[in-house]
Amino acid sequence: MSDLPRRAAAILWKDILSETRTRQGFTAMLSFAALVLFMFSFAIGVDNDLLGRLAGGLLWVAIVFTGTLSLGRTFQNEELAGGTRLLRLYPGDVRAIYLGKLAGNLVVLAALEVVLFPAAAILYQVDFTAQAGPLLLVAVLGTFGFSVIGTFFSALTVHLRARELLLPLLLFPALVPVVLGSVGATEAFLAGDPLGRAGGWLRLLASYDVILFVVCLWIFPVVLEE
Amino acid sequence: MNKLTMLGWVSIALIAVGSVLGLAVLPADALQGEVQRLLYVHVPVAWVMMLAFFVVFLMSILYLVQRQLKWDLLAVSAAELGVLAAVLTLILGTLWGRPTWGIWWAWDPRVTTTALLVPIYTGYLVVRSMTEDPDRRARWAAVIGLIAFVQVPIVYLSVFWWRSLHQPPSSPQSMWSAYGLVMLLGFVAYTLAFAYLWLRRYRLAATELELELSGPEEG
Amino acid sequence: MNDHWLFIGAGYGITWASLCWYLLRLRRRERMAAAASGRGGEGARAGGPG
């Protein structure tokens, strides 16, 4: 059991190495995210007040769309090299694979958000700095929930022919509490939280994160079984 | 006539009686008028949907514990009926909502959650149909059936909070005794119909699995 | 009022139609399975309503 973090870290490190060797994936993802932000402006129009009010929602939708594309790549290396048989060859508890892949997705999404939040601040003219601390908490909870569910479902769908379609089909309904919680809390904080609603959304996010994390971690070995 | 066939005829007869009572015998509701009649179908069908998805959850757990394919077949049979009931619930709900609220879609938390159940369990069915190996198929399906049941109450809660920021939840409806009885009849009738279709669908699934395992050359 | 009856009729109609559709679909698949398994007619005999 004490081996779990070490094995997870080994998988994370392996993925980071193979990802940094060829950075095209991440660069393409960033460009995609920027395009999504532009598309929202094109669809809504250059109404700065309106864009400012919608910024929280638009930002999280951009994160979800871009993140979903990146999730599809979670198990791609192993799948190309020989499917789950290869994954099961990793020594020790298979839960380490889940934790390692989850950490990898967290790193990728965090890197994405580091670029996306300032980009949204510039494009939609919102000021994230006034509430930087609370917003950071929202980002952490939202990103964690997204990764927990996303990593799990990408393991489930990696063998399927139509996985590009099935991953979002399973993922998006499961993300509803994450999206509503993140958007609700972000918008509340951006408005200075006059009605004290942000706390409720944060508690919802945190409890959903914990429940899903426990369930996914517990049941993950079944997904990879032979 | 075997017992299953009897069950089928009884449930059809009860649904027919319920339809006649709901459409022709009962007077219009004092508050909501004629359109109330849709609720005698809408509410029982919504109940069947919840029952079906709960059955999927139970069967998924049983499969994961015992690893017998029959639990998987029972689960997929219930999932199919659950999706059908969910779509019906949505159609009936919008048909009721349009005259009552004046709009087809009011983002009511229950309606919205039901609408989210359709892609969840469609995903369940599609993942299942795309996996060839029966054991893998059953295992992945059971995992989705289990996760779905964990997430749905929280999805409902979050949609409820999201909505409650804009509009208070709808007021409780008046309970009139004849109304209650017809509603109860609807619950019984649609539950029996679910049981009938579920078992018959399960028998079909068992036959199909047998065929699948015996290989395509045979027969 | 007439408008409401349109909605009510549509609701009950769609419910019955989908029940019948599901039953017919079940029966067709049962017949196909029965034919394929060569135990001819068992599915059809146990057909039931619909």
Image: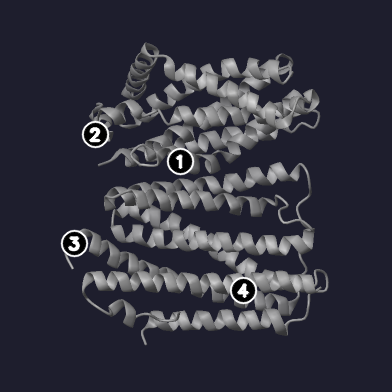
Q: Which of marks 3 and 1 is in front?
A: 1
Residue at the outermost top position: A21
What amino acid is found at the position of numbered circle 1 in the picture?
Leu
Which residue corresponds to mark 2?
A: A85
Report whether mark 2 lies on the same chain as mark 3: no
Same chain, labels 4 and 3: no
Label of residue C18 in the image: none
Disc 1 is placed on an element classified as helix
Q: Residue at x 76, y 56 (%)?
A: B103
Q: Residue at x 36, y 36 (%)?
A: A158
Regarding mark 3 in the picture, which secondary structure is present there? helix
Viewer-side residue, B170 vs B128: B128
Q: Which residue carries the number 1 mark?
A: A165
Res B175 visible: no
Q: Is residue B73 visible?
A: yes
| Residue A79 relative to residue B109: left or right | left
| Residue A200 falls left or right of residue A33 | right
Q: Gap between marks 3 and 1, in whole Å? A: 32 Å
Residue A189, quarter of picture: top right
Give me the C-alpha separation between circle 4 and circle 3.
41 Å
The answer to whether marks 2 and 1 mark residues whose Cβ atoms lie closer than 8 Å is: no
- Identify the subunit bearing mark 2: A
Circle 3: residue type:
Ser
Q: Name the residue under label 4.
A: C13
Image height check: is B217 above or below B19? above
> Residue B107, how many percent across, how many down?
70, 49
Closest to the camera, between mark 2 and mark 3, is 3
In this rendering, position of residue A159 left or right of residue A41 = left
Please state which of the two labelled residues, at mark 2 or mark 4, is closer to the viewer.
4
Colouring style: one colour
Q: How crowded is mark 1: few (under 14 residues within 10 Å), some or many (20 or more)?
A: few
Are the residues flagged by discs 2 and 4 in contact, CB closer than 8 Å? no
